[in-house]
Image (tube, rainbow, N blue to C red):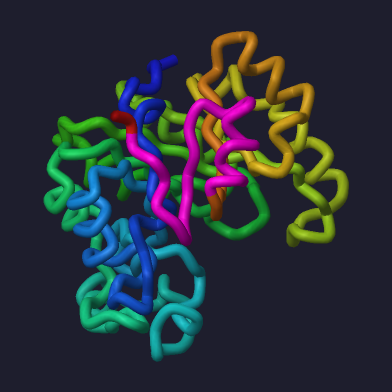
Amino acid sequence: MIPLASAFIDIPLAHRALHDVSDGRPENSRAAIRAALDAGYGIEIDLQLSADGQAMVFHDYDLGRLTDAKGPMNARTAVELAQIPLKGGTEGIPTLKEVLELINGRVPLLIEIKDQDGAMGTTVGPREQATALANSTYTGPLAVMSFNPHSVAEMARLSPDVARGIVTSAYDPDDWPLSTEMCDVLRDIPDYDRTGASFISHEACDLDRPRVRALKQGGARILCWTIRSPLEEAEARRIAENITFEGYLAALPA
């Protein structure tokens, strides 16, 4: 188990960077990352995989919501994706390598590796390998996480010196494309110890769950997602030690 650096507790984390499409800063864009750096916030980003195996900073499996292109993003190469502007901005989809160079250790960076197939299955490897390769020489505060515990376990194998955690949830079956049985299993966070995790990032509305409290009492660091107002932040911080936020400017430490 690699402890989570204190910076991930001390500095609020901008969800998909400090995005505001009305100001030309789409989510997970270079512009949003630059804004977070300028403001002094930590940064949370998402990773998908290009057709040629590059770790790309992008949330969705499909290009349609965030760009004017259509189809699965993993059908395009990194060069092709770089040439597709994000809606509301002027820049294309960045690689993880480009983002690491841009951040350069100035603030903590939390990377969410998206599930390979949306089923939380054991088919993992390519995304994790691309992530490990891109961050192999990075020296700034860095942590990785995923909803899929198998992905977290693979990162433990590939990048054993990088802090890792599990993104966790109430797992209401109505909100997930998963079986009720799978939701029941994941809700109890059974893989925390076997993955060598040092933190969870839990769904904010479910922070009162006894399992979350038990993990905290056992030494796990508790982050949460996604906070959208100071009122929500105050409520979440009764249990969570830090927040991932969007839609407002979270208070920075004095």
Query: Which image quarter holds the C terminus?
Result: top left
| Range of residues picked out in magenta | 230-252
Residue at position x 61%, y 45% from top?
Answer: 232
Q: Residue 193: give x, y in percent of width and height.
A: 59, 17
Q: Locate the N terminus by quadrant.
A: top left
Residue 94 falls in image quadrant: bottom left
Residue 251: % across, % down: 39, 41
- Count of numbered marks: 0
Foreground residue among 163 and 216: 216
Q: Is residue 127 visible?
A: no
At 17% from the left and 47% from the top, the residue drawn is 103
Residue 150's x, y, as percent?
56, 37
Is 251 magenta? The answer is yes
Horizontal side of residue 224 vs 188, given as left or right: left
69 is higher (above) or lower (below) than 116: below
Question: Residue 40 lies in magenta, yes or no?
Answer: no
Quadrant of residue 119 in the image? bottom right
Asked whether the viewer can see residue 124, the reply is yes
* Residue ranking furthest to the right: 180
Q: Is 228 or 190 nearer to us in this picture?
A: 228
Horizontal side of residue 253 vs 169, given as left or right? left
Residue at 19 percent of width and 32 percent of height: 140
Q: Is residue 217 left or right of residue 86?
A: right
User: Which sits in the foreground, 72 or 57?
Assistant: 57
Q: Classify residue 67 by image quadrant.
A: bottom left
Q: Locate residue 201, reporting x and y percent.
A: 55, 36
Name the residue furthest top: 218
